[in-house]
Structure formats: C-alpha cells, structure tokens
Image: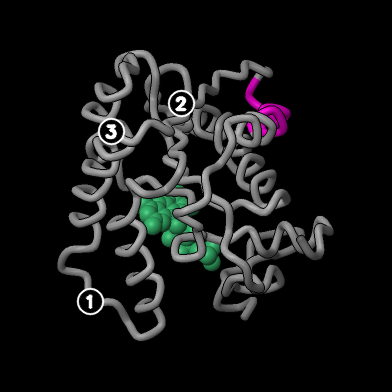
Amino acid sequence: MGDLSVANVLTTTRTFRRKLDLTRPVPREVIMGCLDLAVHAPSGSNRQGWRFVVIDEPDLRAAIAHYYRLGSAANLSGRVPTPEQLADFESATYLADHLHEVPALVLACQSGRPPTSPAKLASFYGSIFPAVWSFMLALRSQGLGTSLTTAHLAHERAVADVVGLPFDSVTQVALLPVAYLRAGNVSPGARIPAERVTSWNGWTSSEQTQ
Ligand SMILES: Cc1cc2nc3c(=O)[nH]c(=O)nc-3n(C[C@H](O)[C@H](O)[C@H](O)COP(=O)(O)O)c2cc1C
C-alpha cells in the first residue's frame, strides 16, 4: 500500500472522485473499523454528538445521489471555471454523475441543529469535523478514499427523509462517498505554503507574508 507515514497520509488524503473504484465492494467491517478510529477525535466537552449513517443499499444510494446531483448542479451552474479550476470542476461533475455507484455513502451528522452564536457554531461544527477528517485519514491509510462533500445539504430535509433521520434534532454536516482506490500514485494537493498564511506574535496581512 506504499508509504503510510503520517506525513504521507496527511498530504495525500485528497478529494478522491475519479480514483474511486466503483466496482469493488467495501466490507462493512472495514467502514466500521475506520469509524472506530474516527470516534477518537475531540469534541466540545467530550460530548461526542456525532452520528454516522452508512448507506450501502442501492435504492437508498440512488435516492440520495438524486438530491446530491440537484445540489451539485445548482452549485456549479453558471460558474465558468478558470483553466486552473477546470479539472476540479470536471471531477466534481463526474462524482455527481456516479455517486449512486459508489459502494457506500456515509452521512456524518451532529446532534442538534446549528446554533447562531459564532462561539456555539464553532463548537457545533468543530465537534464533528475532526471526526470526519479522522475517518478520511483512516480510510486513506487502508487503501480507500472519499471526498468531503456538502452539495446534498441544499436538500438536507429530503435526504433526512430518505434514511428516516430526525431533521429537527440531527444536522447532517457532510456526505462521504467511500470506495477502494484504483491503483496509482497520489500526489499532494495544491496548497499555499503554511509560511504564507502564518504570522508570529501578531497579525500580518497575507499580502505582506507572501
Ligand atoms: C466543507 C467542504 C465542502 C465540500 N463540498 C464538496 C462537494 O459538495 N462536492 C465536491 O465534489 N467536493 C466538495 N469538497 C471538496 C473540495 O472541492 C476539495 O477539498 C478541494 O477541491 C481540494 O481538493 P484536494 O484535496 O483533492 O486537493 C468540499 C470540501 C470541503 C472542505
């Protein structure tokens, strides 16, 4: 499976779309094993309000993919990608077109509905996304991959109804399509170096740090 160093896993846990193997089933125990690792993430007051709904039944995947496609089409419509954005744009369209074929869709959820105060909002989402990222890293370390997606949230209530999730007391935060990865190298993504987005002992505008 190649280099499993922390640095490699952290830099190559990419947004996998075209590289997802749509033909290879993912055993439930593999997903559960990764979720077992993910729930070691921190959460505010150690509340652990996360819930995960794994969907591997074809009709349910198709129903969710339908709403994802609607959200994705609305997000992408009217946008003219720059040449640098084109590959990402096309791969996002590919994922939307094939979502129903991905072996498992994982809905990451947080108990409650989003609060309005900035501090509470930070705690609300900050108490689930570390677990989401840990899940993504755990998958990557075992030869699987996913993408952190949110396009379905434009139709959050309809998706909640598909899986019988109580919308009024549980918030979906992300949809993670899980599959084994097709063979091939994975390169780190394009990122602005930390040096350019960091200042010491006081704020420095990013223009000055470049
Ligand atoms: C909060 C969030 C929401 C995202 N929503 C979507 C989405 O709905 N659909 C999608 O295809 N990608 C989605 N992405 C993936 C980003 O487009 C992706 O992380 C970015 O292009 C970097 O890709 P890379 O990690 O492969 O370099 C989302 C990422 C984040 C962090």
Instruction: Specify whether 99 is left or right of 11.
Output: left
Range covered by the magenta-colored residues: 35-44
Mark 1, secondary structure of its residue: loop
Q: CA distance from mark 3 to mark 2?
A: 15 Å
Mark 3, secondary structure of its residue: helix
Label number found at residue 53? 2
Residue closest to the far left: 78
Could you tell me how many numbered marks the image carries?
A: 3
Which residue: 62% across, 19% down?
48
In this view, the mark in front (1 or 2) = 2
Label number found at residue 105? none
Q: CA distance from mark 1 to mark 3?
A: 33 Å
Viewer-side residue, 61 vs 171: 61
Residue kind at label 1, given as amino acid type: Val
Mark 3 surroundings within 10 Å by alpha-carbon count, few (fewer than 14), some (14 through 19), many (20 or more): few
Q: Position of residue 147 (x, y in %)?
A: 49, 52
Which residue: 38% across, 77% down?
85
Label number found at residue 80? 1
Sequence-wise, the earlier of marks 3 and 2 is 2
Label number found at residue 59? 3
